[in-house]
Amino acid sequence: EVQLVESGGGLVQPGGSLRLSCAASGFTFSSYWMHWVRQAPGKGLVWVSHVKSDGSSTGYADSVKGRFTISRDNAKNTLFLQMNSLRAEDTAVYYCVRDDIGLSPFDYWGQGTLVTVSS
Amino acid sequence: EIVLTQSPGTLSLSPGERATLSCRASQSVTSNYLAWYQQKPGQAPRLLIYGPSSRATGIPDRFSGSGSGTDFTLTISRLEPEDFAVYYCQQYGSSPWTFGQGTKVEIK
């Protein structure tokens, strides 16, 4: 059974940092692209970042470029999102999402982890 | 960036009725790589339809997708109580991946 379990969310002050993790199981993690998608309270879904299966390519939404860094450890089946210079508008549930080849629908989603940026 | 606009914003229907949701893209979606997701309160989204008319694993056949280019439709032939939720379209043919703003299907 495919499982994606996020962790690392919490309350952080504006300007602070947080590192999210996503533990993957039930599939060959190193064969899949992975993404982070976020959802602000009561709002819609917004793509944040992607990483290719081997980690050789990454991409970011303009709203987080230069502040967030996505990475992965294929030996440990884990996806990461390092978030720096956090702003109030980064407050959201962050979902870890699987994608087959980068031109595939998002077929499995984690349960999400809540990040709250507030003083 | 491809902007996806969903309509209507809210659809008020009764169980057993047919639901028709629209998703319009600001430019042609590459290879019709358009997907639909269902999200219930407190839950992660779930993939329903992709490509744009293939059902994901385990999705009942009352859900169907159609369309091409810039205009796509999700149809629920007969609403079941568990279908009342928010539905999002997404294009996955070009980066950045983008979502529509959602259509809420509520009980009338």
Image: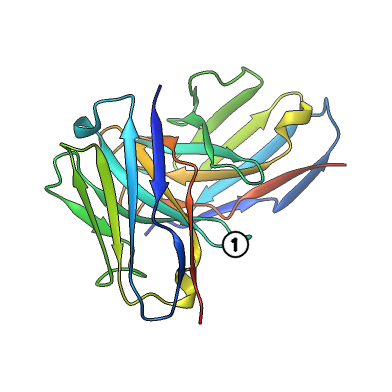
Residue A46, above or below A54: below
The answer to whether any part of residue A63 appears in the image is: yes
Residue B100, percent across and down?
53, 52
Q: Quadrant of the rendered structure where residue A24 is?
A: top left
Rendering coords of residue A21 (x, y %): 33, 50
Left or right of A25, for residue B36: right
Where does the N terminus of chain A fall, quadrant-wise?
Answer: top left
Identify the residue under disc 1: A41
Q: Nearer the viewer, residue A92 or B49?
A: A92
Secondary structure of the residue carrying numbered label 1: loop
Residue B14 versus residue B91 in the image, above or below: above
| Host chain of mark 1 | A
The 10 Å Cα crowd at callout 1, few under 14, some 14 to 19, many 20 or more, is few
Q: Amino acid at mark 1?
A: Pro
Task: Choose top left, top right, bottom left or bottom right for residue A2.
Answer: top left
Residue A63 spot, x, y in % from top left: 37, 70
Instruction: Give the number of marks.
Output: 1
